[in-house]
C-alpha cells in the first residue's frame, strides 16, 4: 500500500473541496454552451442504430436506441444526443436520450439526421388496447430494487429495518410477496383503499419513513 504524506493529503483534500465548490459555476458554463454538437474537424459519413428496428408489444414496453456515427477517419462515436429526430405523429414518444415508448398501435419510421447523413428505423407498435397482466417479479420487484428498498442498507439487511424485512436484492420473491401482502395483518397493502397502502405512503413521504422520500 502506498501512503500519502499528511501535508500532501491536506493539499489534495483542499483542492477537491475547491473543485466541488466550483461545480455550480461549471454547470452554468455548460448550460450556457448550448446544445451538444460535433467537435470541429469531425465528419460523419454514416449513421447506424442499435437495435436496427423496434417492436413494442404492450403499453409498458420500451426500447433504448443507441445511435452511432462512423467518422471519415474510420472511428466510431456515440451520436445519440446529437441527431435530429422526426417521429411518426401519435405512434411513439422519445426522450432526448432516445428512449422510445409506445403511444398507439400502428407502424412507421423514426428518422434521424446528422451532418447531412440520414437513417430510418422502422417501428411497430401493438397491444396498446389489450389488458397487460402485472407480474410481481417483472414489474414490482425491479421498482423495489431501484428505490433501494431491498438493499443491504435498508429492508434487505439480515434483520430488516423497523420490523419489515425483504430478501436481499429480491432473491426470494415468494417471501417478499408474503411480507408485503400478509405480514402485519396486511397493513402494507390496503386492498379496500389501495391509495392508503403503507407501501405507497411511506416511500412517497405521505407518512413518516426513516428511509425518507424515495419516489413521487
Image: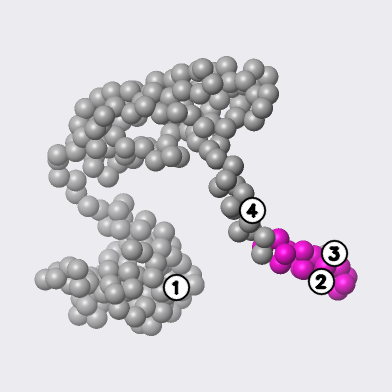
* Residue density around tag 3, few if under 14, some if 14–19, many if 20 or more, within 10 Å: few
In this figure, which residue is indicated by the disc labeled 2? Answer: 10
Kindly state the secondary structure of the residue where label 3 is placed: loop
**Which mark sits nearer the N-terminus, 1 or 4?**
4
Mark closer to the chain start, 2 or 4? 2
Which corner quadrant of the image does residue 89 belong to? top left
Badge number at residue 154: 1
Residue 95 visible in the picture? yes
Cα gap from disc 1 to disc 4, whole angstroms: 34 Å
- The residues colored magenta run 2-20
- Name the residue at 81% across, 71% down: 10
Between 45 and 41, which is closer to the camera in this rendering?
41
Say which quarter of the image contains residue 145.
bottom left
Count residues near mark 2 (Cα–Cα under 10 Å), then give few for <14, some for 14-19, many for 20+: few
**Real-space CA distance between mark 2 and mark 4, rounded to the nearest whole angstrom:** 24 Å
Task: State yes or no: residue 4 in magenta.
Answer: yes
Farthest residue to the front: give it: 32
Single out the mark in the foreground, 3 or 2. 2
Q: Quadrant of the N terminus?
A: bottom right
Query: Label 4 to label 3, Cα distance in Å?
Result: 32 Å
Q: CA distance from mark 1 to mark 2?
A: 34 Å
SS at mark 2 in the image:
helix
**Which of pointers 3 and 2 lies earlier in the amino acid sequence?**
3
- What x and y, as percent, mark residue 205? 33, 73
The residue beneath circle 3 is: 2
Q: Is residue 11 left or right of residue 121?
A: right
Q: Residue at x 29, y 34 (%)?
A: 92
Helix, strand or loop: magenta stretch: helix
Q: Name the front one of labels 1 and 4.
A: 4
Disc 4 target residue: 26
Amino acid at each position: 500500500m502506498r501512503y500519502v504524506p499528511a501535508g500532501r493529503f491536506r493539499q489534495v483534500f483542499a483542492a477537491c473541496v475547491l473543485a466541488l465548490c466550483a461545480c455550480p459555476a461549471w454547470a452554468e458554463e455548460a448550460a450556457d454552451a448550448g446544445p451538444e454538437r460535433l467537435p470541429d474537424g469531425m465528419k460523419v459519413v454514416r449513421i447506424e442504430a442499435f437495435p436496427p428496428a423496434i417492436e413494442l408489444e404492450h403499453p409498458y414496453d420500451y426500447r433504448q436506441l443507441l445511435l452511432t456515427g462512423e467518422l471519415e477517419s474510420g472511428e466510431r462515436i456515440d451520436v445519440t444526443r446529437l441527431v435530429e429526430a422526426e417521429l411518426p405523429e401519435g405512434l411513439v414518444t422519445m426522450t432526448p436520450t432516445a428512449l422510445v415508448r409506445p403511444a398507439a398501435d400502428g407502424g412507421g419510421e423514426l428518422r434521424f439526421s446528422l451532418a447531412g447523413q440520414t437513417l430510418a428505423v422502422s417501428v411497430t407498435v401493438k397491444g396498446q388496447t389489450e389488458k397487460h397482466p402485472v407480474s410481481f417479479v417483472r414489474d414490482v420487484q425491479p421498482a423495489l430494487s431501484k428505490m433501494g428498498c431491498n438493499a443491504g442498507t435498508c429492508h434487505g439487511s439480515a434483520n430488516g429495518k423497523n420490523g419489515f424485512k425483504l430478501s436481499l436484492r429480491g432473491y426470494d420473491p415468494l417471501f417478499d410477496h408474503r411480507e408485503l401482502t400478509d405480514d402485519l395483518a396486511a397493513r402494507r397493502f390496503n386492498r379496500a383503499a389501495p391509495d392508503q397502502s403503507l407501501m405507497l405512503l411511506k416511500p412517497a413521504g405521505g407518512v413518516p419513513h426513516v428511509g425518507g422520500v424515495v419516489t413521487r
